[in-house]
Amino acid sequence: MGNVPVNEAFPSGFVYDYAGSNWNFPTAGGTTANNVGEFFDNISAAYATTPPSILPQNPLGSTLVLHGTQQMSVGPVLVDTFSHAHFQDHGGYN
């Protein structure tokens, strides 16, 4: 299963939900799964100042900054499509 290409796409791009936000939109990338089929995807909001990114709260915050759709492919095969939501203190998938 290993050594296969894994790629992502953001077919509809991302949309700001927080007026005046300057967070960067994620950039699509790719990697290769390891010898047991594992791979890692890192999406973050570095150096965001409006609104300021904060550590996860307890309970998690509800300030939605941006959202979009992500597709994951293994080789030429689309394997999943899901929604991304980036909150001021955390991110998540649907």
Image: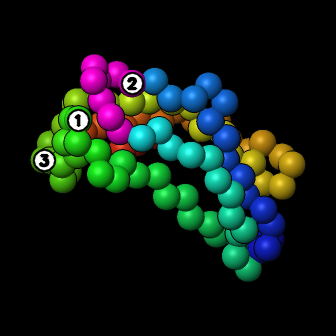
Q: CA distance from mark 1 to mark 2?
A: 11 Å
**Residue in the image at 78% along x and 62% along y:** 5
Q: Tell me which segment is drawn in magenta.
A: 16-23
Between 35 and 49, the one lying in front of the other is: 49
Expressed as whole percent of the image width and height from the top left, the position of residue 40 reads 56, 64
Amino acid carrying label 2: it is: Tyr
Q: Is residue 93 left or right of residue 11?
A: left
Q: CA distance from mark 2 to mark 3?
A: 24 Å
Q: Label 2 neighbourhood size at 10 Å, few (<14), some (14-19), many (20+)?
A: some
**Residue in the image at 73% along x and 79% along y:** 35
Expressed as whole percent of the image width and height from the top left, the position of residue 34 reads 70, 76
Q: Is residue 76 left or right of residue 50?
A: right
Q: CA distance from mark 3 to mark 1?
A: 21 Å
Query: Which residue does the numbered mark 3 point to in the structure image?
Result: 58
Q: Secondary structure at mark 3?
A: loop
> Up-down: is 45 above or below 42?
above
Query: Which residue does the numbered mark 2 point to in the structure image?
Result: 16
